[in-house]
Amino acid sequence: LSSPFSQSLRLVAPIGNRSTRGIHQLGGAVDPESSQKKRRTMLQYLSDHFYDVEFLRGYFLQNKMDKVHQKNRFRDKEWIRPDKYGHFSQEFWNFSEVPVEAVDASDCAINYEGLENLHLLKELQSLSLQRCPHMDDWCLSRLYPLADSLQELSLAGCPRISERGLACLHHLQNLRRLDISNLPSVSNPGLTQILVEEMLPNCKVVGVNLAEGLKLGPEEQPQDTDRPIPA
Amino acid sequence: MLPRVLSLGVRRGPLTRRPGTLRGGFSLGKVVDDRWYCGSGVRPTSGCVPFRTRNRAPHWQDSGSAWGRGYKYWEEKLSEIKKKIQSVLPGTSLHPLYDSSHLPPDHSDVVIVGGGVLGLSVAYWLKKLEKQRGALRVLVVERDLTYSQASSALSLGGIHQQFSLPENIHLSLFSASFLRNINEHLAVVDAPPLDLQFNPLGYLWLASEKDAAAMENNVKVQRQEGAKVCLMSPDQLRNKFPWINTEGVALASYGMEDEGWFDPWCLLQGLRRKVQSMGVLFCQGEVTRFVSSSDRMLTKNQKEVKLKRIYEVHVKMDNSVEYQPVECALVINAAGAWSAQIAALAGIGKGPPDTLQGTKLPVEPRKRYVYVWHCPQGPGLESPLVADTSGTYFRREGLGSNYLGGRSPTEEEEPDPENLEVDHDFFQDKVWPHLAQRVPAFETLKVQNAWAGYYDYNTFDQNGVVGPHPLVVNMFFATGFSGHGLQQAPGVGRAVAEMILEGRFQTINLDSFLFSRFYLGEKIQEDNII
């Protein structure tokens, strides 16, 4: 998004700094044209000599800055979240051309039909579907249109996903990080992790402790009956 | 008939006739069956085996003579008394001296011959779409409730939408959405949800040079009808699946969504459970006879045609001569590989050849082998069901490098469908070379297991037969799907149920699958059959 105010935003000090010293410099930055020099010097002269003019100038400039900040309040922010009522702000609609980079749908009741909506996000890089109760193998077979851009996928804690659904993630060749921890329906987590790693060679697959089946619990430690003092 | 009239004449008259000697009634023992019947012409066994009688008087007894009137009067009286007793003691049989709980009921609105996945699917949709709860009484007659030879249980369980006929594509799409929401369709109170073990990895069809154009056309049709299929060149194939040897492959079509394989036994048991909870009765028995009445009608061109209506189905119990005549309004032939026998019992195909009466149901059992082998270096977890140019197919099974596969034999190599014995030489000579050629890793493999199953093979055009027969007006077919019956069962079941309840196909139009195409010679050939 190239905003006409982008240049000014970089130069603008953080909101709340209303020092008068800054205003003269700001004034110069906002109107860089030299044809306005005469007017500027007139204004400058007036504000130097009259506190009211100075104050008014500061007031109008501050209003302009507030409007610009309000318009750009989603920029450079980490996540767009719903408010306490669960609603997303209506301003969000103004950003319909902005590509969505990441979607966090954890604990959402998203299902097979709902995943169709994700197909429109052509530049989605990170998708988190942790603990979604309705995500199953059929749903995973719907993720292939995101293959070009998706780099991070998290399926931790989904109760209905099994190794058969994980197999159809092989379309996502750009995936760099895949989280498959806590999948109760996967029959053999260690073996599945190995096979998935083989399937997606450029991807880091996390979530399964490969030594799970191998480590003995404390009560199963081999008892050495000859030792007088227990380990 | 003559001896009976004579014996009646010998007695003194209607007023002195004792009820006990009348036809039927409460006595055990011989019952003479003297209705007009068309069919095999063999009189039913009438030894000292007790069986139920019919309440309806034969139509020829409507004579004006004193004998006829009196006889009918007693018949009616008896049936009234029987009904009164039945209403007083609901659920108990009229013969308290022996147990008849294994027998099917006396009457049933619909009798479904064959309890495989197609028959159960028809039963499910009939009960689901009936206008009022309990409006239809449905009976499913299955010869072998262990399903030891049933095609549904022995199937590989694949589902795909890559057909050349739009109707087949729609049927598969419908079935896929049915299977996806199977726990909403087949939910039974207090029963655990079904786990179909669906594997959504898709089908990969390989085409050689000469089939490439046809495949492209087919994919266009499939995309139009809504299937998500993508075409791949040999280079793309090698990129995606490095274990394939693309020699001889010009084009490949890969199904991306709604395609894969699942556990057919789970579907069968789920349907059975649900259908039983909806009130469908099951009976283990074999259908040995259809009793039908016929009517002679004139067509528009003043030609005479004989229309038949089956009103009774004789269901014979296992290992005994005992049978139960079930009065019915509709018969559904879902007997799979043995549908032709059932059709022949109804008189379909008995007539001069090249006429509608003489057109047989062209479904016959064909034996197909499935082999299971282990190959440690084989294709990885992402391998789809690969159908080779030579007709060989294989898919991965589970996490442990096991693979299932086989090949459809050519017409000359067709094995004898007498039994389900497996021919291991077939694998050595006909399947393995093609497998090894297509996937070099399969040069070293070890066969673990093998089994054989029947295809209900339609020798006419390898597509299913759905809908009523033109002459036997109350027999409906749901058979002949030649290897893709399991994946189309939900759709076909719904189509037959709609045909019965509404009179026409509503969801998917299967008019081209009717029986009459065998007589008219209109083949609807399906190319993508394995």
Image (cartoon, rainbow, N blue to C red):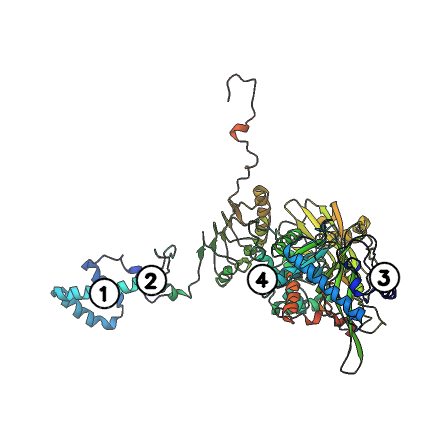
Which is more toward the observer, B202 or B434?
B202
Residue B390 seen in the figure: no
Query: Which mark is on residue B133?
Result: 4
Q: Return the disc, 2 or 1, that comes first in the chain's sequence.
A: 1
Q: From mark 1 to mark 4, how far is it between C-alphas? A: 75 Å
The residue tagged 2 is A72
Question: On the rendered structure, is A51 left or right of B16?
Answer: left
**Which quadrant holds residue B162?**
bottom right
Q: Secondary structure at mark 4?
A: loop
Q: Secondary structure at mark 2?
A: loop
The chain to which mark 1 is attached is A
The residue tagged 1 is A61
Rendered location of residue A184, percent (x, y): 53, 45
Say above or below: B76 vs B183.
below
The residue tagged 3 is B42
* Tag 2: amino acid: Asn
Which is more toward the observer, B269 or B58?
B58
